[in-house]
Image (spheres, rainbow, N blue to C red):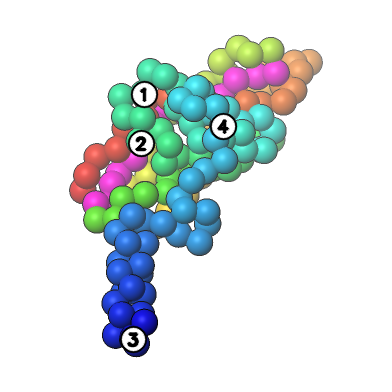
Amino acid sequence: MKIRHVRAVAVAAVAAVALTGARQSGGGCDDNSGGSGGGTTTGGSSAGAGASSGSADKGAAEDLRIESCEWNGSELAARVRATNRSASTTYTYTYKLTFSGFDGKTLDSSHPSIPAVLPGRSAAKQAGIPYDVPDNARLGEISCKLTEVERTAV
């Protein structure tokens, strides 16, 4: 093979990687083995990407992941990361974040957003809701769930 052929193949390979949005982090795939089932995190350990099957945009649901979920003594807090897998479109992500107690009962929810995530990049949002635990109540372990996930081209 001549050097010009090798160079052409290398350029084609780089272009293919750039156009598909593949990255060093494993080709853009997350560790969600649950398909489109609800993404839930308990006690700050991520259990996958997340939106319930009620999500209008499955691609958007796959772009979001709960990184942490906890009660920090004064508020229910969660960190959510959006990874824009597009090669050319900037997206804003909106979602419903629901906090549940150890017994599965909903404690509270919010509707945060992660604005203007550039193609091939990720951004995180720390969301918190003030929450007072009643006297003698046991809060236990907190879980978080993402639903109503949408992404809008900017």
**Residue 71 seen by the camera:** no
Q: Is residue 90 magenta?
A: yes
Can you name the residue that lies furthest to the front here?
1
Label 2–label 1 contact, CB within 8 A: yes
Read off the residue under disc 4: 33
Q: Nearer the viewer, residue 80 or 13?
A: 13
Q: Position of residue 61 (x, y in %)?
A: 40, 33
Q: CA distance from mark 1 to mark 3?
A: 51 Å
Read off the residue under disc 2: 60
Label 4–label 3 contact, CB within 8 A: no
Read off the residue under disc 3: 2
Read off the residue under disc 1: 55
**In which quadrant is the N terminus drawn?**
bottom left
Q: Nearer the viewer, mark 1 or mark 3?
A: 3
Disc 1 is placed on an element classified as loop
Q: CA distance from mark 1 to mark 4?
A: 17 Å
Name the amino acid, label 2: Ala
Quarter of the rendering containing residue 136: top right
Q: Compare marks 2 and 4 and give the one earlier in the sequence.
A: 4
Stretch of the chain drawn in magenta: 89-102
Sort mark 4 into few (<14), some (14-19) or many (20+) by Cα contacts within 10 Å: few
Disc 2 is placed on an element classified as helix
Q: CA distance from mark 2 to mark 1?
A: 8 Å
Q: Is residue 140 magenta?
A: no
Q: Position of residue 36 (x, y in %)?
A: 46, 25
Can you name the residue that lies furthest to the left here?
154
**Residue 100 seen by the camera:** yes
Q: Compare marks 2 and 1 and give the one earlier in the sequence.
A: 1
Q: Is residue 67 left or right of residue 120?
A: right
